[in-house]
Structure formats: structure tokens, C-alpha cells
Image (cartoon, rainbow, N blue to C red):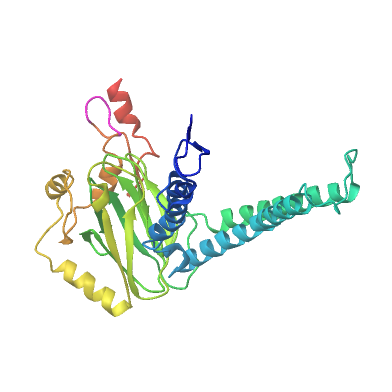
Amino acid sequence: MRNPDPSTGQAATAGPPSSALTSPTSPPRLIATFLRRAAIAAAAGPLALLGGCNMVLFTPKGDIGVQEKNLILISLGLMLLVVIPVIVLTLWFAWRYRASNTSATYAPRWSHSTAIEVVVWSIPCVIVLTLGVLIWRSTQSLDPYRPIESQVKPIRVDVVALNWKWLFIYPDYGVASVNQLAIPVDTPVEFNITAESLMNSFFIPQLGSQVYAMPAMQTKLHLVANEPGVYAGRSAAFSGPGFSDMHFDTLATNRADFDAWIARATASPAMLSRAAYEQLAQPGEKAPVTLYSNVAPGLFEGVVGKYMRDVHGNPICGTVAGVSTPALTLNHRAILAAE
């Protein structure tokens, strides 16, 4: 609608003045400001979250951890040999063959280039073959069941994942601990791992591999710490409401300090009898560090074989030459009795 302007006699256009379209508070300006701030927040948000991360996998303190770090970096580098050129060439093609660049060659009927085909297929094939050889060799050398070659006799530790705490039994010393693992530096450690009820995962990131802890099964893991320190151990599998507090400290010390820790455990008034274990196995969160002396014989084997029983409650796991072999050697008498 147009109305005459009294001062000029000319028709005036209804609506806001033109200056309102460029006002700092106009809708277009507000939308542009919002989008700009949202982009900044989207870029800064992940960086702020990553600021709280501790890349312990890239600061290993043991030989197994070092080998796994090198494997990760080598695999990443080989994959980046493909990813980086693809990203760079994609951006270069978009710029080179943009619609406004009239100097670029226009070849709508082009369909084949032997040189390009050779490059596109040969490089990925070489990378895949290299990764295949690398994975095969590392699978053999980093097998968690493979003992670590050393002139030092390994330390044996039986690990039981409870709800929600970790129990460590030292069968060669007759002691145990809850939520604290002590190991000597430069000494291989042989872990035998199981779980009381829920499936879990045993993990010391700075020392190496994680291995699952499963009820009625026994898994193995071999690690070594080459530098003294306190390394975080944790559960790497969600197992219920107490999962967030299911962690422990790994004390890697010299041999004298390790022997002193064993002496303190031996002198502890708390004894890990079967009755004490049954009480400890009850679900509980934020369990304090506790040392036990006089561990009941065969306690770990009993945890592994507790579900391997016949209808009468008799164990169907047997022993060979006095060595317990749960879930492997069956007690045939118990089976016949069950029938």
C-alpha cells in the first residue's frame, strides 16, 4: 500500500526503513551471529573434552605396553598413507575443477587411465599386505598366554574379579590383597584370571593388554613393569552400579620394597579363609585396600570350579598329580554318580 508523503507529494512505501535491514539487532544479523557462535562452540567443545584425557596407552612402562604402542602407531601411519592423500586430492580437485576455473581441462568423455589404475590399486594392496604381515607377527609375539622370556623367575598372581572389587592372591607367598597389586620391577608377572559371578575385564593400560575375567573359566596374561611407579588398574567392562569405583593401584617397586610389602601382608591379622572369602564376595562398592595372610589352600581353584558341580553338589573337576586343572580334567566318578 502506498500513501502520499506530505512534504514531497510523492508516494511512500509502507514497511520498515532500509536502515532496519542492516541493524545489529535485525533477524539476519542475529541468525549470522548465532551460527558463528555455534560453530565456535562446536569446534571448542571436543577440544575442551579432550583436555581431560590422559593418553596412558602412549606412555607405557613395560615391554608389552611399548610393543602395543608401536603397533598402534605403525598401523595408524600405514592407514594415514591412504587417508591423507585422499583428503588432499579431494580438496585439490574441488578447487582445480571448480566452475569458475576456465583454464582447467574439460574432458567429459574421459573414462580410463592405466597409470591412475595402477596407483589406485597397488598402493592399497601393498598397505593391506604389510598390515597382514604385521598383524600375524604381533598376534604371535603379543599373545597374552605367551610367557615373557626373562632370566628372572616370574611372579604368579591369581586374580578374581568380585562385585565390585579386585582380589589378588599370591600362591607362592600365601598372601592376598584387595584393590592393590604389588609387583617387582623387571620381573615377569603371570596372571591367572577368573570372576566370581559377572563377566569383567582386567586392564593395566600402562603395562599392556586387557584380558576378560569370566566365571567358571580361567584366562592368562603375562606382563612386566620396567619402571618403578604407581600404575592405574581398572575394570574395562561394565558390570553394574559399582563399576565406576572398581579400580586398583599397581605398585611397581624394586625387589626390596616388594619383599617388604609381602612381609606386611604376611603379618596382617586378617586371614583369607573360605568363610572370609564368602563374606568378601558379597557385592560392595568402594572397598578399601586390605591385606590378607594365610590364604586358604585351593581357594582360587575353588572359585574357578564352583559352577562345575553335579546334581549332588560334588565337583566334577579333578586333579592330576596334585595339580588342580579346573574346567579341563573331569571327575568321571562324579559324573557317574550324577547319572
Magenta stretch contains residue 242: no
Identify which residue, 332 or 111, lies in the foreground. Answer: 111
Rendered location of residue 338, percent (x, y): 28, 23
Secondary structure character of the magenta stretch overall: loop
Question: Does residue 93 appear anywhere in the picture?
Answer: yes
| Residue 169 shown left or right of residue 209 in the figure | left
Rendered location of residue 25, percent (x, y): 40, 50
What count of labels does the image hold? Answer: 0
Question: Does residue 171 appear anywhere in the picture?
Answer: no
Which residue is at a point 27% across and 60% down the rendered structure image?
Answer: 248
- Establish if 9 lies above or below 166: above
Which residue is farthest left?
269
Start and end of the magenta stretch? 308-313
| Quadrant in the picture for residue 27 | top left
Magenta stretch contains residue 312: yes
Quadrant where the C terminus sits is top left
| Residue 128 shown left or right of residue 166 in the figure | right
Which residue is at a point 33% across and 59% down the rendered structure image?
Answer: 233
- Establish if 17 lies above or below 131: above
Which residue is at a point 45% across and 62% down the rendered structure image?
Answer: 57
Which residue is at a point 23% across and 49% down the rendered structure image?
Answer: 299
Rendered location of residue 227, percent (x, y): 40, 75
Rendered location of residue 108, percent (x, y): 88, 39
- Establish if 216 lies above or below 84: above
| Residue 114 shown left or right of residue 301 in the figure | right
